[in-house]
Amino acid sequence: MTQSITIRRPDDWHLHLRDGAMLQGIAPESARHFGRAIIMPNLVPPVVTGAQAVAYRERIMAAIPAGADFKPLMTCYLTEDTDANDLAQAHADGIITAVKLYPAGATTNSASGVTDFDKVRPVLEKMAEIGLPLCVHGEVTDPAIDIFDREAVFIDRVLDPIRKATPGLRVIMEHITTKNGVDYVRSGGDNLGATITTHHLIINRNHILVGGIKPHYYCLPVAKREEHRIALREAATSGEASFFLGTDSAPHADAAKESACGCAGCFTATNTMSLLAHVFEEDGALDKLEAFASLNGPVFYGLKPNDATLTLTKQDAPVEFADKIVTGAGPVTVFQPGFPVFWAAS
Ligand SMILES: NC(=O)N[C@@H](CC(=O)O)C(=O)O
Ligand SMILES: [Zn+2]
Ligand SMILES: [Zn+2]
């Protein structure tokens, strides 16, 4: 008997669509299965004002295939010079859905991020007042802190103090990679949520490093030990309202990944829903996939779930995904999980 499951059309609460030829090449990959996505603002230069978010949204809409049921939800990049009134106006005008905090130097294109968190306190207070959520890349940049500990240390040193100083602020810990992140989110009440990526449910740090370095598995925050992957799986498949899908699909041209100094980012837009069906089935939790991918995110953001649906069907033969998406900015390798996947999305 063919196994299939129909869920509300999912949303992607953390997505990199880039710009220019890369945007043109990869936008259709997300528009195929997802209804909405929170669009990360880490372009070069970053999207810092409401006006820049409007212009970027227009470029995205032009890259989405005609008739696709996909809505980009825009964000602004928080800097130490961000104008709280500009953000408030952009929020009131329905232009931005969230603001993104990058600690300066933490990840790809984060040079304009925040070094002194006290400098952004008035902006965060304004955001709390008007109900504009903050998406956080949660890693410290202190060179003395081991890269595998940077998320856990960020929670204690930065995130918890910010949340205590601005209690009404709604915060999404983006792409959590540790049991520490899962535990912190569970203890954080209704104003704290977390996105979990597809790839962090599948790989641990061995996948990156054993048997030769695998640049296409390198992302930030870097995948951690197996015990952390298990904690993420357990959180994602629990159905708990605080945890929702943010693929962090982050395309880089192969030449930039397969390099002596390779960029961080896994590109999962193409096959995420098939991979998630595999993961949730493996954990006996297919009935929780809809909560994770389609319901919990809208509730956190105060939006309705999508009316449209997506059907995942288990096939007899493995689904064949494109190895690479060809773009005008070069080929982009699609994340390969390392096992056959039988779930097709339509
Ligand atoms: N996740 C990544 O490894 N890379 C992202 C940035 C980010 O989300 O931290 C990118 O923009 O390439
Ligand atoms: Zn990030
Ligand atoms: Zn990201």
Image (cartoon, helix red, strand yellow):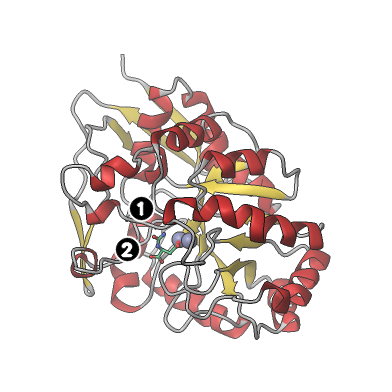
Between 278 and 45, which is closer to the camera in this rendering? 45
For this rendering, which residue is in front, 159 or 65? 159
Image quarter where the N terminus lies is top left
Residue 32 picture location, percent across and down: 37, 52
Q: Residue furthest front?
A: 144
Q: Please say if 135 is above or below 317.
A: below
Which percent across, then down, holds residue 56?
A: 48, 78
Question: SS for tag 2?
Answer: loop
Classify 221 as above or below 259.
above
Q: Residue at x 26, y 32 (%)?
A: 341
Callout 2 amino acid: Pro
- Residue toward you, 242 or 224: 224
Q: Which residue is mark 2?
A: 251
88 relative to 220 in the view: left or right: right
Circles 1 and 2, Cβ within 8 Å, touching? The answer is: yes
Name the mark on residue 269: 1
- Residue 42 position, x and y percent, is 47, 73
* Image quadrant where residue 314 sits: top left
